[in-house]
Amino acid sequence: MVVPTRPAGRRLREALAEHANGRGQAVFPPRVMTSDALLAYGLPTAAASRIESLLAWAEGLREVDLANCRDVFPRDPPERNVAWAIALGAEFGRLHVVLGVGGADTEVRPLG
C-alpha cells in the first residue's frame, strides 16, 4: 500500500491490528511504503515530480480569483507575477508536506 507519510503507514498497521484484535483474529500487515519509496524503485507512475508539483502550484496561484479566497489571501499581493506564484507555491508545497507528516488531511482541493 502506498501512503503519504511513514506515520500514516504506522497508523494504518495499528488500525488493522486493532480491528483484527477486536474480532479475535490476526492479520498479516500489508507492505506499506511512501510514494517517495515507490518512486525509488523506478516504477512508472503518474506521480508528479517536485518541480512539476511546484509548477502546478504556481499555475493554480496565477489563475485563482483571490477575491474568492479572502481567508487565505486577505489582501492582494503587491505584484502577482511568476516569481510571487513560484515562491508562494513552494511555501504551500512545504506546508503540504509538513501537514502530511503530522497526519493532517492534506488532500489538495481547488482554491476558487
Image (spheres, rainbow, N blue to C red):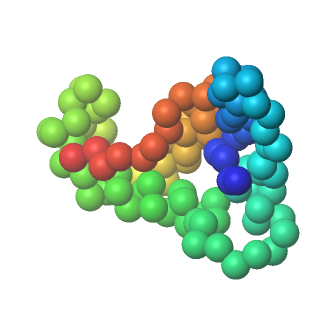
Q: Examine the image and state in which quarter residue 20 appears.
A: top right
Q: Position of residue 42 (x, y in %)?
A: 81, 74
User: Which residue is drawn at the image coordinates 82% and 43% (left, top)?
Assistant: 28
Q: Is residue 97 visible?
A: yes
Say which of 7 and 60 sits in front. Answer: 7
Give the number of callouts.
0
User: Which residue is drawn at the image coordinates 49% and 33% (left, top)?
Assistant: 105
Q: Examine the image and state in which quarter residue 37 appears.
A: bottom right
Q: Is residue 104 above or below residue 63?
A: above
Say which of 106 and 60 sits in front. Answer: 106
Q: Is residue 40 above or below residue 23?
A: below
Side (left or right) of 74 relative to 21: left
Q: Position of residue 65 (x, y in %)?
A: 19, 48
Say which of 76 and 110 sits in front. Answer: 110
Side (left or right) of 69 relative to 24: left
Q: Is residue 10 visible?
A: no
The outermost residue toward the bottom is: 44
Say which of 111 and 28 sits in front. Answer: 28
Q: Position of residue 21 (x, y in %)?
A: 73, 23
Q: Position of residue 101 (x, y in %)?
A: 67, 32
Q: Is residue 93 above or below residue 16?
A: below
Side (left or right) of 82 relative to 74: right
The outermost residue toward the front is: 24
User: Which residue is drawn at the image coordinates 21% and 46% (left, top)?
Assistant: 112
User: Which residue is drawn at the image coordinates 45% and 61% (left, top)?
Assistant: 56
Side (left or right) of 79 relative to 54: left
